Image (cartoon, coloured by chain):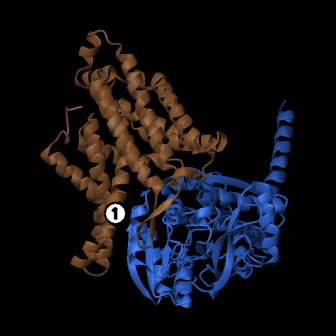
Amino acid sequence: MLKQVLAACTALTLIATLIAPGASAQTLNIAVVTTLTGPQAPLGEQIRDGFQLALDQHGGKLGGMTVDLTIVDDELKPDVAVTKIRGLMESKRQDFVIGPVFSVVKAAIFKPVTGGGAYLISPNAGLSTFAGKACSPDLFVTSYQNDQPHSISGQFATDKGYKRAFIIAPNYQAGRDALNGFKSRFKGEVVNEDYVPLNQMDMQSEIAKIADAKPDVVYVFLPGGLGISFVKQYRQAGLTTIPVLSTFTVDESTLPAQGDAAIGFYTGTNWAPNSDNAANKAFEPAFEKRFGYVPATYAAQAFDTANLIDSAVRVAGNDHAKLRAALEKADFASVRGSFRFGSNHYPIQDFYLAKVAKRADGKLQTEIVSKVLSNDVDPYAAECKMP
Amino acid sequence: MILLIVQALNGFQLGMLLFLIASGLTLVFGVMKFVNLAHGVQYMLGAYLGVTFATHAGGFWPGLVLACITTGLVGLGLEWLIYRHLYNRGDLEQVLATFGVIITLNEATRLIWGSSPLQLAMPEALSSTFQLMPGLRYPIYRVALGLTGIAVAVLLAVVVNTTRIGMLIRAGATSQEMVSALGVDIGRLFRIVFGIGAMLAGFAGVLAAPLVSVEPGMGESLLILAFVVIVIGGLGSIRGAFVAAIIVGLVDTLGRAMITTLAHTLLSGPSAARLGPALASMLIYLVMACVLAVRPAGLFAGRA
């Protein structure tokens, strides 16, 4: 009896020693934190799908290591995100946490993730907080610094010689940041700086003000439902002669609901479905075939994020310390073309103005019009001193 | 000056849309003393069903009719399944249960239609525009929306003031027990009122769909405004809801249109840019507070 028990124990220990180190050396634990419920869920789904596509293309592995992927829905609530992330990281050490969509969530999960020994890689939210003095060696951002997309339109308006601009954003911090971003590069006069409540549904009042002010150009940051109402009603009001520049107002996540009304609207971006490079020519059709919708920047940035990890792990395995230098190299083919990291781990990349157009198959997409900023470095990078 | 008139017209329209929603809410509350937070969900449901029926049943008009009927039926279904058990309970239980309905139906909508927003095209006959001021064309649809609001208000006034069912509604608002004691099937009256309320919300949803984004949770922001309307107008009063809806629509739109300019003339620089929008979004609540201070029961309380 004793013999049998001893034998069983030995066998178990043997199995345990065989499995345990093997598992930790071969598996890469990755959590994707994204918003999958509520009105903003389409953006979160794009991030999930973009990441998944890259993972599938590498056969469920990144850098040769099998990926154990966990999808976490942050519900766009910072407290929920923190609770879920803490729980996950206590039960299983994570190598990478990818996410989130929104800056409010990012600020909340930053400490729990980096404190738990994982790299936080943000495929969308690009808070200025972590770009300057408070930059972190454990944080990488693959999208942009939040100021940059807005400054594209400002620069474009200046380049075009527009004198008078009418600018609109929702009345909250990101809205004020957006308009400041535009103004930072716009040399003309801002005739009206209009802030609307986040939950406003009728934009007719703003449109009447635009018609009255007769500006040379309109700049709007109206995400989600606000932008959908604005675009529809702007067209209904027949304001065809005044060009509209925008950020996060017309993209592939809102275009299906805006329909033909959105054709001709401009948006500042780092990528569009027709971006002209080999990596994107493979990515865009593959994404549509797999998920049945046109990807927006969210999906493209998440796809890049997965390929970034692939390139780094291939060199450094899942050794946290070695990974940093490998990630900093950004040795992968970005769907945006040129891509490298600045000293603050935020990207240095080109920015474009894109225009909404109808494709031959009847679907709408944004298409690159011209390059506005080349190898743009965000305004906070100089303040960052990496330890 | 022209701009002021245009903005007033915009405000009036918003008011009419609010009235369509608030009238159902105030009817239900007035007659049944039932706090239905899920009224906004009926509005959302109307918009979604409108889009679906319009796509599959041949255009806006069949979509409008079918969506109204279906939201009415869904309202009746909810009444039978959940609400009728709550009539004799306290406000808190009613609020909790109807809040649960909001969450459930919002998520159900997301499961059925997906989380991406949808769109509904304006009906062909009303999609043309006319010149309202230099550079601004105005869709006839918006004018039609305003007129529809007035028509519904007149219709409701006639029904409530001259028909037998209207008499019962008025009586029910005054004393449920008495109506019941006189041999009227109060349960049936409640169902009728509830069905009409749900249908009005659905109707408003379809009408709003070509103008705004059809997305899960779209009813909640409007529901708050609808509550402000019925509080200002007096709970249970159709006439109050009509007047208050116009007040709220005008104050909200004109406030947002004018107050920033006003703040800029009084103050200078960034403080004006901050104060203006903040004040504008508070304005309707300030109006509500003022009305309640003078007439605690609302403008038309106790007169159905």
User: Considering the numbered disc 1 on the image, is that residue within a helix, a strand or a loop?
Assistant: helix
Between residues A42 and B54, which one lies in front from this camera angle? B54
Residue B246 visible at all: yes
Residue A172 falls in which quadrant of the image? Answer: bottom left
Residue at image location 63% in from the left, 73% down from the top: A143
Residue A27 visible at all: no
Quadrant holding the C terminus of chain A: bottom right
Left or right of B139, for residue A268: right
Residue at image location 56% in from the left, 88% down from the top: A160
The answer to whether residue A31 is above or below residue A324 is above
The chain shown in blue is which? A
- Chain B shade in the render: brown
Instruction: Give the image location of residue B6, x and y in percent.
Output: 35, 64
Subunit of mark 1?
B
Residue type at numbered disc 1? Gln
The answer to whether residue A252 is above or below residue A370 is above
Left or right of B227, for residue A6: right
Instruction: Give the image location of residue B164, x and y in percent.
Output: 31, 19
Residue where numbered disc 1 is placed: B7
Instruction: Give the image location of residue A35, x and y in percent.
Output: 58, 55
Residue found at the very far left of the displayed protein: B294
Between residues B88 and A17, which one lies in front from this camera angle? B88
Quadrant holding the N terminus of chain A: top right
Residue at image location 31% in from the left, 31% down from the top: B158
